[in-house]
Each structure stands twice: as structure tokens, then as C-alpha cells.
Image (tube, rainbow, N blue to C red):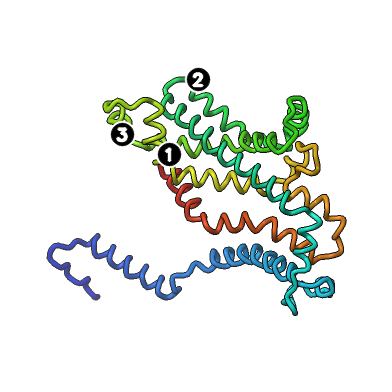
């Protein structure tokens, strides 16, 4: 019978067993290469479901009409052509539609950040009062009411008050983004130490000065996150502008694409060029600001 090796001074049997388990774990990791293959495969498949359609959109947009209908969507353009972009620019009246979309998105982002931060400030500083606490729960409940459920009532109300235009669409975007934005802002504000405000109050700062000069700058990462989500939701929305805006000349890009699609339904290069021009701003904005999205959501979840 082989006796176990004697313990070294200052060590215990439990400690030696833990070291053995650690060595075994390191050995398993070295054998597997440190890869979680099932998760890696799933992520690769999910990535391909995004990159493949994007690749097809880009290559089809730069093809001529003859190349676009040859049945080979994955082939590279030979030669590259901007014919589809020129026709899509004219058919959709792109500058005007782009201006309307920018206006709606700008109002939505600004209004969402301001109103959500105001509401979150009031709720987080009056959490002990039942009215503010229940107001927070009321806003959370509104997250379960999407626009299609309330579409008919919103269409009638906006028409009655003269908001069947891009301004009314922007206001509705703010209202439907308010719940999630207040949730993020409230979680962040409740994590800020109260001593910061107390020191500012001792120095004679008013409520407005405390918010604008002290708290609102601290909300910059969360404001960026809320603004990006509001921009993407507003820019890519189709149903709300289509139902609310009465004048076809004041429609946003997603709606105009659908309206004019019948005019170039067989010209795939024009269709894909139009799609690429419409989604390019949102892709650029997200790529440039994705680190703020992740950091803001992470901070809100942790805090």
C-alpha cells in the first residue's frame, strides 16, 4: 500500500486537494484550448445571419440592372455602378425624406433624454412616497403596451389635435421610449451617493443647479445609451409614421421606400440601393457609439 505524501509545513489536506483540483482544471482548459465550442458555433451562426444579408445588400446596390437580375446575388459587381443609387435618390426624393427622418429622430432623442432624466430624478429622490413609487411601476407597465395595440386610438387622437404630422410622430416616439429610459436613468441615479447632493446644497445650490451642474453630467454614459436606443427606434420605425402622418410628402424614409417600391420592384439594384441609403445612418451611428451602449447598459444593470 502506498502511503500519501506527508504534508508540507503550513499546509493542510484541504489545501492540497484544492491545488490538485486547480491543476486538473488547468489541464482540462489546456486540452480544450480554452474555447467554448457550442457557444462559439452559435455566435458564428448568429453573426452570419447578419453579415450575409448585409453583404448581399451592398453588392446588389452597386450592380447594374442586368447584373442584378442574373440570379447570382453573391457575385461581386463587374463593373461597379451607382445607377441604382441615382434612381433611388430620384424616386424616393431622398433629400426631403432624409430631412424628415432626421427631424423626427432629433426631436425623439432630445425629448426622450430630457423627459426621462427629469422623471427619473423625481422618482429616485422621492422613492419613499407612494405616489412616485407607483408612478414608476405605472411607467414599467406601459412597456407591455406596444404601439400596434394602441394604434387606432393614437391615430384618432393625433388627428383630432392636429398632430398627424412628423411632430406628432416624434412625440409618440418619446412617449413609447419613456418607460425603458426611465428605468435605466432611475437605476443609475439611485446608485449615486447622496453626499454629493448634500455638499452642493450646503454650498447654496438650488434643485435645478444640483441637477444640471452635478447630476446631469454624471448621467452622460446613460444619456448616450438612451439616446442611441431612441435614435434607432425612431429611425427604423415604419408603422407609426405610416399610420400617423397624413401627408405622403412628409413621410420618413422607411415609409417612402414602401410607397415607391412598386415603381422599382423588378429593379433589384435600385431597391437594394434605397435600402442601403436608408439604413446606412443607423449602422454608422451604432458602430461609432456601441461602446457607450454596452457601458451604459452594464452600469445600469450593476448599479
Which corner quadrant holds the N terminus?
bottom left
Mark 3 residue crowding within 10 angstroms, few (<14) / some (14–19) / many (20+): few
Q: Residue at x 70, y 61 (%)?
A: 276
Q: Residue 253, position in %: x, y?
A: 73, 50
Q: Quadrant of residue 194?
A: top left
Cα gap from disc 2 to disc 3, whole angstroms = 25 Å
Q: Pick out the residue farthest to the bottom.
A: 78
Cα gap from disc 3 to disc 1, whole angstroms = 14 Å
Q: Against 79, is 286 above or below?
A: above
Q: Are marks 2 and 3 in contact (CB under 8 Å)?
A: no
Single out the mark in the foreground, 3 or 1.
3
Which corner quadrant holds the C terminus?
top left
Q: Are marks 2 and 1 in contact (CB under 8 Å)?
A: no
Q: Quadrant of residue 138?
A: top right
Residue 155 disc label:
none
Q: Considering depth in this image, is 133 or 296 the residue closer to the camera?
A: 296
Q: Residue at x 40, y 41 (%)?
A: 217
Q: Against 195, is 14 above or below?
A: below
Which residue is denoted by mark 3 in the rendering? 196
Which residue is denoted by mark 2 in the rendering? 131
Q: Considering depth in this image, is 2 or 30 the residue closer to the camera?
A: 30
Q: Residue 30, position in %: x, y?
A: 40, 74
Mark 2 / mark 1, whichever is N-terminal: 2
Which residue is denoted by mark 1 in the rendering? 188
In the shown orientation, is residue 36 left or right of residue 212? right
Q: Residue 4, position in %: x, y?
A: 22, 71
Q: Residue 238, position in %: x, y?
A: 73, 46
SS under mark 2 = helix
Q: Are marks 3 and 1 in contact (CB under 8 Å)?
A: no
Mark 1 residue crowding within 10 angstroms, few (<14) / some (14–19) / many (20+): many
Mark 2 / mark 3, whichever is N-terminal: 2
Amino acid at each position: 500500500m502506498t502511503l500519501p505524501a506527508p504534508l508540507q509545513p503550513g499546509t493542510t489536506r484541504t489545501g492540497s486537494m484544492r491545488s490538485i483540483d486547480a491543476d486538473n482544471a488547468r489541464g482540462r482548459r489546456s486540452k480544450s484550448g480554452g474555447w467554448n465550442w457550442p457557444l462559439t458555433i452559435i455566435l458564428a451562426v448568429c453573426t452570419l445571419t447578419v453579415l450575409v444579408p448585409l453583404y448581399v445588400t451592398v453588392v446588389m446596390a452597386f450592380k447594374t440592372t442586368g447584373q442584378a437580375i442574373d440570379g447570382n446575388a453573391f457575385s461581386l459587381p463587374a463593373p461597379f455602378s451607382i445607377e441604382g443609387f441615382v434612381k433611388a435618390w430620384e424616386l424616393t426624393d431622398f433629400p426631403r425624406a432624409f430631412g424628415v427622418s432626421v427631424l423626427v429622430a432629433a426631436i425623439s432623442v432630445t425629448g426622450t433624454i430630457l423627459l426621462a432624466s427629469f422623471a427619473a430624478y423625481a422618482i429616485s429622490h422621492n422613492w419613499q412616497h407612494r405616489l412616485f413609487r407607483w408612478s414608476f411601476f405605472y411607467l414599467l407597465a406601459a412597456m407591455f403596451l406596444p404601439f400596434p395595440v394602441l394604434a387606432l386610438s393614437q391615430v384618432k387622437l393625433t388627428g383630432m389635435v392636429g398632430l398627424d404630422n412628423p411632430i406628432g410622430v416624434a412625440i409618440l416616439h418619446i412617449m413609447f421610449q419613456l418607460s425603458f429610459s426611465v428605468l435605466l436613468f432611475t437605476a443609475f441615479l439611485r446608485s449615486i451617493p447622496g453626499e454629493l447632493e448634500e455638499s452642493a446644497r450646503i454650498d447654496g445650490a438650488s434643485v435645478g443647479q444640483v441637477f444640471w451642474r452635478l447630476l446631469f453630467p454624471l448621467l452622460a454614459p446613460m444619456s448616450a445609451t438612451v439616446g442611441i436606443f431612441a435614435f434607432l427606434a425612431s429611425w427604423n420605425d415604419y408603422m407609426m409614421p405610416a399610420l400617423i402622418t397624413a401627408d405622403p410628402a412628409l413621410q420618413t424614409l422607411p415609409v417612402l421606400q414602401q410607397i415607391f417600391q412598386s415603381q422599382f420592384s423588378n429593379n433589384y439594384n435600385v431597391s437594394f440601393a434605397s435600402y442601403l441609403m436608408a439604413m446606412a445612418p443607423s449602422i454608422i451611428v451604432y458602430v461609432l457609439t456601441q461602446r457607450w451602449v454596452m457601458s451604459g447598459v452594464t452600469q445600469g444593470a450593476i448599479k
